[in-house]
Image (tube, grey):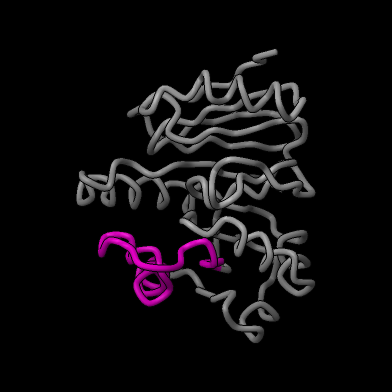
Amino acid sequence: MKFYLWWWWNPDKWEEALDAFYRCIEKIFKGEGIKQILHIPFARTGIMKKNRTNFLPHKFWPYIRKLGIQYLNAQYIEDIKKFSGDTIYINGGNDNEFLLKMCKEDILFSALQKAKIIIWESAGAMILWAYLRNNDENDWIQWLWYIENTLIEPHFTEINSQEILKKWIKKMQVQFGLGIDENTFVLYKNGIYGKIIWTWKIFHKENLL
């Protein structure tokens, strides 16, 4: 299983950020030969700015289909059942705990386990390692999973998160901290961080104990 990890760019630069995202994501789709995407939108709930709707199903599916990729919406049981095990795309957003709850549902959890590739964005989709930050951002919830003994901090350089990450690593007693800058995709597979897609900012991986 491969993971592509990334974070948003500043929404105040949204047209530029959206164009950059499309170029990055299309490079991944082409390089991986992706034919089908199961979209998990559950982290993006509540009142939001209009620019955030670009990644909700009603706008995301026309973009995906325009690329010749089959779009499946995890809001529907029928779509989850059609998932072949190709690629899952997970939204970030404001409701981390609801995202976690939905991904623990048996039918969706089974889909996650069989995916060849998972692409996920921003703090709301921090569900691929041992701990997920809660909605209030004052604690971490035990998760299950793939990226072990690690906490991940988004928007790393932009909000100077190194001290925040050190604090949480000490509190949660994990060994590694991973900081990812805005609009930076990094490939993770079998414990190794590999290819970085997009050169606007850099990717950080540090042992901070």
Any part of residue 36 in sight: no
Q: Which residue is drawn at 46% across and 56% down?
A: 93
Q: Given the current orientation, which residue lies at the most extreme bottom position?
A: 78
Q: Residue at x 39, y 35 (%)?
A: 182
Q: Residue 199 falls in which quadrant of the image?
A: top left
Instruction: Measuring from the top left, give residue 123's x and y in whole percent.
Output: 51, 45
Q: Nearer the viewer, residue 139 or 11?
A: 139
Question: Left or right: 35 with respect to 83?
Answer: left
Instruction: Measuring from the top left, give residue 180's x and y in whole percent.
Output: 49, 31
Question: Left or right: 84 with respect to 7?
Answer: right
Q: Residue at x 45, y 67 (%)?
A: 45
Q: Which residue is drawn at 54% across and 76% down?
A: 73
Instruction: Measuring from the top left, give residue 75's x and y in whole percent.
Output: 57, 78
In this view, 137 is above or below 37: above
Residue range highlighted in magenta: 39-67
In this view, 26 is above or below 64: above
| Total number of numbered discs in the rendering | 0
Taking the magenta stretch, the answer to whether it contains residue 40 is yes
Q: Which of 173 and 147 is in front in this view?
A: 173
Any part of residue 137 in sight: yes
Q: Which of 181 and 118 is in front in this view?
A: 181
Instruction: Measuring from the top left, give residue 165's x and y in whole percent.
Output: 57, 25
Taking the magenta stretch, the answer to whether it contains residue 4 is no
Q: Residue 56 falls in which quadrant of the image?
A: bottom left
Work out which quarter of the rendered image holds the C terminus and state it: top right
In this view, 101 is above or below 28: below
Question: Left or right: 100 with respect to 36?
Answer: right
In this view, 68 is above or below 156: below
